[in-house]
Amino acid sequence: MKFPTYETTYDYTTDKGWSMKDAERIAITKRANKYEEAGDMEAYEQEMKKIPLAPNLAWMLRDLLGKKEFLEEGYNLKDAEIAYGKNWVDEFNVIFNNEGYPDE
C-alpha cells in the first residue's frame, strides 16, 4: 500500500515562504508568554494557535486527532494550505488509525 506523503517542497527557509512574518510570530509569542506567566493557560493556548502550524506538523496532527477534532481545535492552517492546497484536509486520506498504525 502506498501512502500519501506529508512532505512538501515549499521553501520555508525565508520569511517569503511563510504566511506570517517572523516579527509577527515573535509578537504573538511574547503576548502568549505573558498569559502563561499569569497562569492563564487557556488564553496562552488561544494566542499560540494564531501562529500557523508547519505543514508537516499540521498533517500529522490531522492524522492523529482525526479531521473533525483537528479542525475543532482552531489551529491556523494557512501554511498548510499554501503547501498542500486549500482543501488538503479533505482531499488527502488520513493515513493512521486511532491506534497510530497505518490503515490497511
Image (cartoon, helix red, strand yellow):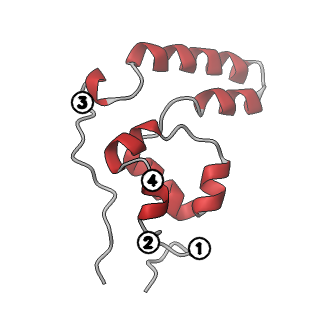
Q: CA distance from mark 2 to mark 4?
A: 16 Å
Residue linked to disc 2: 95
Mark-to-mark CA distance, 1 and 2: 10 Å
Question: Residue at the location (46% across, 81% down)?
Answer: 103
Question: What secondary structure is marked by label 4?
Answer: loop
Real-space CA distance between mark 4 and mark 1, rounded to the nearest whole angstrom: 22 Å
Q: Earlier in the sequence, mark 1 or mark 3?
A: 3
Would residue 10 be found to the left or right of residue 88 on screen?
A: left
Q: Is residue 43 left or right of residue 100?
A: right
Residue 100 is situated, as x and y percent measured from the top left of the image, at 51, 72
Q: Which residue is mark 3?
A: 13
The image quadrant of residue 16 is top left
> What kind of residue is marked 4?
Asn
Nearer mark to the viewer, of 4 and 1:
4
- Residue that numbered label 1 is attached to: 98
Q: Are marks 3 and 2 in contact (CB under 8 Å)?
A: no
Point out residue 2 in the picture as x, y percentages from the top left corner.
Answer: 28, 78
Left or right: 73 in relation to 39? left
Q: Earlier in the sequence, mark 4 or mark 1?
A: 4
Quadrant in the picture for the C terminus: bottom left
Contact, CB < 8 Å: mark 2 with mark 4? no
Most foreground residue, 103 or 33: 103
How far, Cα to Cα, is label 1 from label 3? 33 Å
Q: Amino acid at mark 2?
A: Ile
Q: Earlier in the sequence, mark 3 or mark 2?
A: 3
Q: How many marks?
A: 4
| Label number found at residue 87 | 4
**In contact (CB < 8 Å): disc 4 and disc 1:** no
